[in-house]
Structures are given as C-alpha cells and as structure tokens.
Image (tube, rainbow, N blue to C red):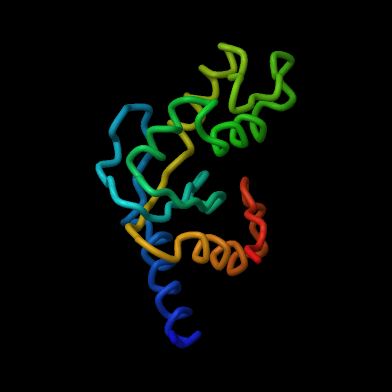
C-alpha cells in the first residue's frame, strides 16, 4: 500500500511544477501548440492566477480543444466570466458556440490573458485534480469536480 505521506509529497512536487512560471506556456490560438500526446494534468492561469485544473488522456488534444467553444468547458466558462453582461451573450454549450462577435472577443481575451502548464501523468490524474482544488480552496475555479466516492 502506498503511504499517504508519499502521495502528498508526489502531488506537491507536481503542483510546484505546474505553478512554476518557467513551466507556464502563453496560450495562442494555433493548433498543436502543445506537443505532449501523453495523459496528464494541466492548469489554466488567467493573468498568472490559477483558475482551472483538468486532466486528460491526451494533453495535446485537450489543449487543441480550447480552439472551439463546443469542445472545452473552460472556454465556455472563460466566455461567461468576461462576456455575461454583453448584450450579444447567450450561454454556450457542447452543442452551441457563442455569437460570432463574442467568439472573436473571447479569442482575443484568451490570447492576452491566458497561459497553461501541464504534467504527464498516467495514473492518479483525477485524484490529483481533486487534491489541487482542495489545496487551493480559496480559489474560485472555473471548474469544480465533485469528490469521487
């Protein structure tokens, strides 16, 4: 059995890697900006503040998903955060994008304010995601996973 202290230490190392500014990549709206095809965890930072933690079986594909509002909940949450009061705003979903004018504004805002980091990780991704959200309990994440039972 793996000791809780060992897990805590491992998760702390991953957290430190993810939040290190040297490991953060400025977001740009281009395909394949991330070359990591392995499974892992990733964080999005808005103006250098952590706002989202996610996990994926393929980091490259998941980062590419940010190019389409229908494909990533973070893009939809980011749009809601900044454009909810815009008269053209209508909630986006996995089947509908924002108004084209809001999509343009959203892409521009993401290019200006967004960065991300990732860490390859084959197992324990969901557990790490929950652990990091608990660690940063004061942060209002744009996603909040429910505890696994």
Q: Is residue 101 above or below residue 128?
A: above
* Position of the N terminus by quadrant: bottom left
Q: Is residue 41 above or below residue 107?
A: below
Number of numbered discs on residues? 0
Front residue (pair 99, 130)? 130
Left or right: 11, with 39 as reference point: right
Front residue (pair 1, 23)? 1
- Residue 80 in the image: state x and y as whole percent: 66, 31
Q: Residue at x 58, y 19 (%)?
A: 97
- Residue 109 in the image: state x and y as whole percent: 51, 29
- Residue 82 in the image: state x and y as whole percent: 64, 31
Q: Residue at x 52, y 44 (%)?
A: 46
Left or right: 139, with 116 as reference point: right
- Residue 101 in the image: state x and y as whole percent: 57, 12
Front residue (pair 102, 120)? 120
* Position of the C terminus by quadrant: bottom right
Q: Is residue 141 above or below residue 7?
A: above
Q: Residue at x 43, y 80 (%)?
A: 9
Left or right: 145, with 32 as reference point: right
Q: Residue at x 38, y 55 (%)?
A: 40
Occupied quadrant, residue 70 = top right
């Amino acid at each position: 059995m793996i000791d809780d202290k060992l897990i805590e230490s491992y998760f702390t190392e991953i957290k430190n890697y993810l939040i290190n500014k040297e490991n953060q990549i400025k977001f740009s709206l281009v395909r394949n900006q991330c070359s990591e095809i392995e499974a892992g965890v990733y964080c999005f930072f808005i103006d250098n503040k952590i706002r989202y933690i996610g996990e994926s079986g393929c980091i490259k594909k998941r980062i590419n998903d940010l190019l389409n509002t229908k494909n990533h909940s973070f893009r939809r949450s980011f749009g809601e955060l900044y454009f909810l009061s815009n008269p053209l705003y209508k909630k986006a979903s996995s089947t509908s994008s924002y108004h084209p004018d809001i999509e343009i504004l959203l892409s521009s805002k993401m290019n200006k304010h967004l960065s991300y980091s990732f860490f390859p990780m084959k197992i324990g991704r969901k557990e790490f995601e929950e652990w990091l959200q608990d660690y940063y309990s004061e942060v209002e994440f744009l996603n909040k996973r429910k505890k696994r039972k």
